[in-house]
Image: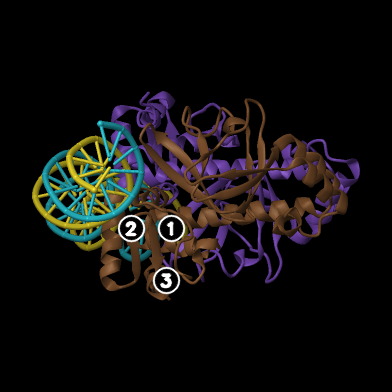
Chain colours: A purple, B brown, C cyan, D yellow
DNA sequence: CGGGCTATTGAGGATTATCAACTGGTGTGG
DNA sequence: CCACACCAGTTGATAATCCTCAATAGCCCG
């Protein structure tokens, strides 16, 4: 399994052997929370199957999903995000969106491997760099553009995550997704998310139900994203 | 200069020598744009002095500032952001906020150094990880919280960047900052940014003028940020 | 069958964008 | 040195978006 991961491709045999030994596989049911690292430690992980949302609590009853990690993606979960950054008292958590599988190890133990294997470091840096770029993109869009654009862009990202449940339905988001989740990812309330989806359903662009969404007209949604960025 | 940078601390002597040879120093006047990498190449850089804004264009007349890089911060500027990600046609640019100095080199040439030096990779990964975490924090806040919170949080970040012009004025943002820039960083229009600042000026919490802002009551602004996240 | 959760829909209101007019400072060129 | 344009900022009126609150319907589970 480790060998097939994009981030580890081309790594030395000894590195792969060490990873084989260190990384522990863990399964998660839908909606289950990934236990965070212990005090003063960190967690390094790789998503093998399924998907996880990175959820940031803003208050006791409100959260925002900052990222969705699909198969092949990696995370560095610092020791409680360091005291000075982040929303104090409300930590970041990882929650599985569907039946998922994860490989995880102590964060501290990855550093010797990174230092020793000349392939690993560039791979991981590139991976993080891409993530930073994508988040900056979403940040810019979601600050400025209206609800329709945000949801359309978000669905465009979500359907690209490959999953088992998509067999035969290419436009189906491959995991459970309530209106509340969608709203938390787009920075909206579930009411507005519901309204936008209802409108799109009337247009015939999507189909949706309790906990699932299927995109039927990808181009229509792409037009909603592009219409506001292109004025040449 | 290279030796004093946090990201390079503890690196091998040969690494530092190589960096010394590869990194070229470049000065920038206020408002000047950093020339991007050539087609198919990339740029690796370290901010030595001053500050730069990472500016993302959304349309021909609107941009958002996704990050502000201060002294000691590093950037990996990919080859035109890769075709599949980002806002097509409107690239990301780096613009200096004040008289600034930068060390830069070809991105491709950093990989051998990273692969060889066991200290460098963990440092850079940690640096990027922190940046990702901070951006996720801003993302969550700015999606959900109102204008006052966003601006207060933003000013809190900006005054922490150390600069020459702050000598004697600890609350002064150490570079030129128009209302338009502030608005672009907070995802607001310059009118609302102006209104909020005027209000704060009446309260005596800030002072501001043409292109500068000084925070006089840090705690008042911190209260504006905290009031909405803590409901225990 | 009832309780809880998800989703839908409506009305009202708060926030913020948009448009517009205006002020004052800065720099430029005659 | 002054007139001028121009830019940054301010302020007001209006409008649009989206949130909040509330009521209701449907689905799943015990």
Q: Left or right of C5: which side holds B3?
A: right
> Residue A146: image x %, image y %?
33, 41
Q: Earlier in the sequence, mark 1 or mark 2?
A: 1
CB contact under 8 Å: marks 1 and 3 = no
Residue behind mark 2: B147
Nearer-N-terminus badge (1/3): 1
* Image depth: mark 1 or mark 3 in front: 3
Residue at the spot of label 1: B141
Pointer 2: residues within 10 angstroms few (<14), some, or many (20+)? Answer: some
Q: Position of residue A192 (x, y in %)?
A: 30, 47
Residue under label 3, please give it: B222
- Element type at mark 3: helix
Which circle's residue, 3 or 2, is located before the other in the chain?
Answer: 2
Place of residue A82 in the rendered image (x, y in percent of width and height, measured from the top left): 62, 67
- Neighbours of disc 1 within 10 Å: few (<14), some (14-19), many (20+): many
Q: Which mark is residue B46?
A: none
Q: Tags 3 and 2 in contact by the CB under 8 Å rule?
A: no
């Amino acid at each position: 399994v480790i060998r097939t991961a994009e981030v580890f491709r081309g790594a030395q045999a000894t590195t792969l052997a060490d990873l084989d030994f260190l990384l522990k596989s863990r399964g998660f049911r839908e909606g289950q929370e990934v236990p965070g690292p212990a005090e003063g430690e960190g967690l390094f992980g790789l998503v093998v199957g399924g998907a996880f949302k990175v959820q940031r609590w803003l208050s006791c009853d409100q959260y925002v999903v900052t990222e969705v990690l699909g198969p092949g993606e990696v995370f560095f979960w610092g020791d409680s995000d360091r005291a000075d950054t982040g929303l104090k008292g409300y930590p970041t958590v990882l929650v599985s969106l569907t039946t998922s599988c994860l490989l995880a190890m102590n964060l501290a133990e990855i550093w010797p491997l990174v230092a020793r294997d000349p392939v690993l470091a560039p791979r991981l840096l590139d991976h993080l760099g891409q993530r930073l770029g994508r988040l900056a993109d979403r940040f810019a869009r979601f600050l400025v553009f209206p609800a329709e654009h945000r949801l359309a862009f978000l669905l465009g990202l979500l359907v690209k995550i490959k999953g088992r449940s998509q067999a035969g339905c290419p436009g189906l988001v491959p995991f459970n997704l309530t209106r509340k989740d969608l709203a938390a990812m787009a920075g909206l309330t579930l009411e507005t998310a519901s309204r936008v989806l209802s409108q799109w359903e009337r247009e015939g662009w999507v189909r949706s139900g309790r906990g699932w969404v299927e995109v039927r007209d990808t181009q229509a949604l792409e037009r909603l994203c592009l219409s506001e960025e292109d004025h040449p």
